[in-house]
Image (tube, rainbow, N blue to C red):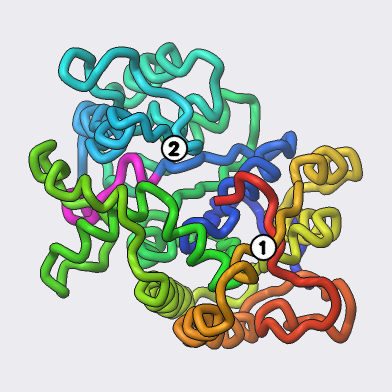
Amino acid sequence: MGTGATEAGCDPAVIVGTGCCGSTLLAHLLHMHPELCVLSEFVLSVADANVVAPADVLSGSEIAAILGRARPEIEFLADRGLRLRQILYLRPGRSDCRQPTPSILLTTLPWLHDDPERAYAELIRFTSLLPPAPFAEQLRVICQHMTSSVGKQRFVERSGSSLGFVPYLRRLFPDARYVILCRDGPETVMSMRDHPLFRLGWSVTQSLPKDRRSGTSLWPALTRAELLRHSQALETAPPLEDVARMWSALTLRGLGALASVPRTSKLLVMFEELVRDPGSLLASMAEFLGVASDAHWAARAKELLSPQPSRVEELADDDQALLRSACEPGHRAINLAAQHCLRPPPLRPQRQLAVLTGTASGPSPHRSPRGAI
């Protein structure tokens, strides 16, 4: 691959993807490495370009207040019995009588600690004492503090649907190395369509003016009453072709925003490759991230992979054709990006980019482990 540990140094690393592409699973695999601390959903929990710019100077107490913000859409779904698997902790009680759960307590801290409330209180104490500094610098200090708190050296940030806010990520972490995780478009779209948060988000974004439908956050500041107006979306799947167009647009926009990142600072990985040969892929990622690989880590990671049949193949032929046609712009963007990114060594020489085009012969490449979203 041509980049080793000494080149990677201590640059922060960021996993980016469309959502429902396997990044949660990849985060689990990387977090199992003794040197890597994955901060899952951290940026999505604390950052919003519509509220705070990376260059804005904030005091420690102001940062602590941001860490205490809740995500009303998550509470809204939870109160309807929709507990998303990436949500690891919610404060007990109903929404009308409980204290809202700070967003960093939903995933980031329970991912790292058995007692997330205690970890949250400690993090607030630490953050409140920070001197005024640009927001991006403050977040870097907080990321390193959380990493050190679990005895690790290197942090990797992963937030869902992060290809939608790459420009903001680049301003937050200007020296970051990017692991770009892509998955077959139609299979991703099938998962997106059925995900409660995507359904709710789809309804919210369709109600916005077109010039507000892309940005750092899928969620504008909505009240509970405003969210109630979109509750019907949870029962109704959006049209597959429309979701596929959204996937293509998100892929095009996110990969385009990464185009100017140096080739040596971005590694493009196909989820299907990870499922097929996790040992080789994890070795490539370890080299890219500047940490040592070992057989024990790869063997433990492989135990998490449980292939599933393709969901797309269950559709009628005409529906499959429509879905693949709507995903074609996204697939072309992936192929183009692959030419300007580092890539893992091919599993077989003739299949180096077959998984990006869907033209590989033999067993279907569109097989995904359970829980990969």
The disc at residue 187 is none
- For the view shown, which residue lies furthest in the front direction? 316
Q: Residue at x 76, y 72 (%)?
A: 364
State the image coordinates of residue 194 (x, y, percent, origin top left): 44, 54
Task: Name the residue beneath numbered marker 1.
Answer: 271
What residue type is disc 1 on?
Phe
The residue indicated by pointer 2 is: 84
- Res. 347 visible in picture: yes
Q: Nearer the viewer, residue 188 or 259?
A: 188
SS assignment at label 1:
helix
Q: Main secondary structure of the magenta part?
A: loop
Indicate left or right for 246 with 49 as reference: right
Task: Name the amino acid type tagged 2.
Answer: Leu
Q: In the image, which residues are magenta? A: 43-55
Dot 1 alpha-carbon crowd within 10 angstroms: few under 14, some 14 to 19, many 20 or more: many
Would you say residue 121 sits in the magenta stretch? no
